[in-house]
Image (cartoon, grey):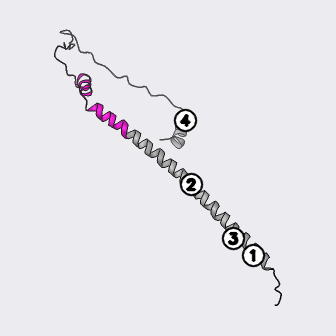
């Protein structure tokens, strides 16, 4: 049998090492993918929890809004309704008195220098 210039055992060890390197690289890739998927899972779970909490808060508001207490509160504050037994008070002015007129003050313009006017013209946020 002729002798081969390379040792079969040495070739088998080199092939085994190369295969081991590829296996480790693939394992590392899968671990990174697992980390990414776990982060995405945590994000989706947080969003789902927030959505459930929002739904519960909205259901609570709907329940209160359809209750008798909410209707009564609206009727007394915004609707200006009264219940039986209430004494409504309507303020009226004295006869012959002039109605009170509220005037809005006119703002006075602030004088600006020419430099400030040009600066605002070129670099202003308007």
Question: Residue sitting at 49 percent across and 29 percent down?
Answer: 111
Question: Residue sitting at 21 percent across and 11 percent down?
Answer: 93
Who comes first in sequence, dot 4 or dot 3?
3
Question: Residue sitting at 37 percent across and 22 percent down?
Answer: 105
Query: In what element is the residue under mark 3?
Result: helix
Q: Position of residue 15 (x, y in %)?
A: 73, 74
Structural distance between the alpha carbons of marks 3 and 2: 26 Å
Say which of marks 1 and 2 sits in front. 1
Q: Position of residue 58 (x, y in %)?
A: 34, 37
Q: Position of residue 101 (x, y in %)?
A: 28, 18
Q: Which residues make up the magenta segment?
A: 55-79
Mark sitting on residue 12? 1
The 10 Å Cα crowd at callout 2, few under 14, some 14 to 19, many 20 or more, is few
Question: Residue sitting at 31 percent across and 19 percent down?
Answer: 102
> Which residue is labeled 4 in the image?
116
Say which of marks 4 and 3 sits in front. 3
Q: Give the left or right position of residue 99, taking residue 24 as reference.
A: left
Who comes first in sequence, dot 3 or dot 2?
3
Count of numbered marks: 4
> Which residue is labeled 2 in the image?
36
The 10 Å Cα crowd at callout 4, few under 14, some 14 to 19, many 20 or more, is few
Query: In what element is the residue under mark 1?
Result: helix
């Amino acid at each position: 049998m002729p002798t081969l210039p390379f040792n079969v055992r040495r070739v088998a060890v080199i092939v085994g090492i190369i295969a081991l390197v590829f296996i480790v690289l693939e394992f590392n890739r899968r671990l990174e993918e697992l980390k990414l998927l776990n982060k995405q899972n945590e994000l989706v779970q947080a969003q789902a929890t927030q959505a459930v909490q929002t739904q519960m808060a909205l259901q609570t508001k709907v329940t209160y809004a359809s209750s008798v207490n909410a209707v009564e509160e609206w009727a007394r504050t915004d609707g200006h309704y009264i219940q039986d037994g209430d004494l409504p008070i309507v303020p009226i002015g004295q006869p012959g008195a002039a109605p009170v007129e509220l005037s809005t003050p006119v703002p006075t313009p602030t004088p600006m220098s020419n430099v400030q006017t040009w600066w605002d013209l070129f670099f202003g946020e308007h």
